[in-house]
Image (cartoon, rainbow, N blue to C red):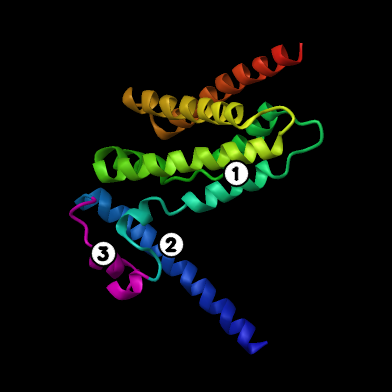
């Protein structure tokens, strides 16, 4: 029992340190700039050494994309849990609501602006986005093998992700606040999925 309690305390401390690193890094990136912020400065915000920092993150870039794996894992989990009678478009809509929108947090808007301002981060985002779409397409195809081949699944995922990304860019480009940008994402998702749903109906007819 004592070992379990000790393990639980240790894990909670690690989670607190990780959150402190993320919060401290994002504040420094906002105040000083991404390139100007050092790993040592980030580590100091959580009262740990630079060496210990690398047991939490491999680089500064990883902090910016700290929730990438969790969001992807949640989306893949939902795709693997297709409900009886649920069409491909309906499944994607549920993934959107229960993963993308539900896991959004207050740092998303500021991180998006940061990524746009740093070429290295934009390149990293494109790489992650391509990998995400590829994995989602394969998962959607596995979930709906009788309805979609892999190319069709990839097209559906690409259409949905592309619509949301362009809506974010357009919303932010006209100076919208985070709430308005979130609403633009939802509208874009609805429009893309409506098109996918009509495609599915015409295929059935």
Q: Mark 3 points at which residue?
A: 39
Q: Where is residue 11 in the image (x, y as percent from the top left)?
A: 53, 74
Label 2 packing within 10 angstroms: few (<14), some (14-19), many (20+): some
Residue position marked by numbered label 1 in the rendering: 75
Q: What stretch is highlighted in magenta?
A: 34-54
> In the rendered structure, are the residues bearing label 3 and label 1 in contact, judged by CB atoms less than 8 Å apart?
no
Q: Which mark is residue 184?
A: none
Q: In which quarter of the image is the C terminus?
A: top right
Magenta-span inclusion, residue 162? no
The image shows a total of numbered marks equal to 3
In space, the residues marked 3 and 2 are separated at their CA atoms by 15 Å
- Secondary structure under tag 3 reads helix
Q: Which of marks 3 and 1 is nearer the N terminus?
A: 3
The answer to whether residue 9 is above or below residue 146 is below
Under tag 2, what secondary structure?
A: helix
Pointer 3: residues within 10 angstroms few (<14), some, or many (20+)?
Answer: some
- Counting residues from the start of the chain, the first of labels 3 and 2 encountered is 2
Q: Which of 202 and 165 is in front in this view?
A: 202
Q: In this view, does 80 lie to the left or right of 115?
A: right
Label 2 vs label 1, nearer the camera:
1
């Amino acid at each position: 029992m004592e070992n379990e309690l000790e393990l639980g305390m240790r894990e909670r401390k690690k989670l607190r340190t990780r959150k402190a690193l993320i919060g401290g890094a994002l504040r420094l990136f906002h105040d000083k700039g991404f390139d100007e912020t050092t790993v040592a400065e980030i580590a100091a915000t959580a009262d740990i050494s630079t060496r210990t920092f690398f047991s939490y993150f491999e680089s500064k870039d990883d902090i910016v994309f700290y929730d990438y794996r969790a969001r992807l894992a949640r989306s893949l989990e939902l795709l693997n849990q297709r409900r009886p009678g649920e069409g491909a478009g309906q499944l994607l809509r549920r993934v959107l609501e229960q993963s993308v929108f539900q896991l959004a947090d207050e740092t998303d808007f500021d991180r998006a602006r940061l990524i746009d301002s740093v070429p290295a981060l934009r390149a990293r985002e494109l790489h992650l986005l391509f990998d995400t779409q590829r994995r989602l397409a394969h998962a959607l195809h596995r979930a709906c093998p009788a309805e979609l081949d892999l190319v069709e699944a990839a097209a559906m995922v690409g259409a949905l992700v592309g619509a949301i990304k362009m809506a974010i860019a357009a919303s932010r480009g006209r100076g919208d606040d985070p709430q308005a940008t979130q609403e633009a994402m939802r509208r874009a998702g609805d429009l893309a999925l409506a098109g996918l749903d009509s495609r599915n109906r015409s295929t059935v007819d």
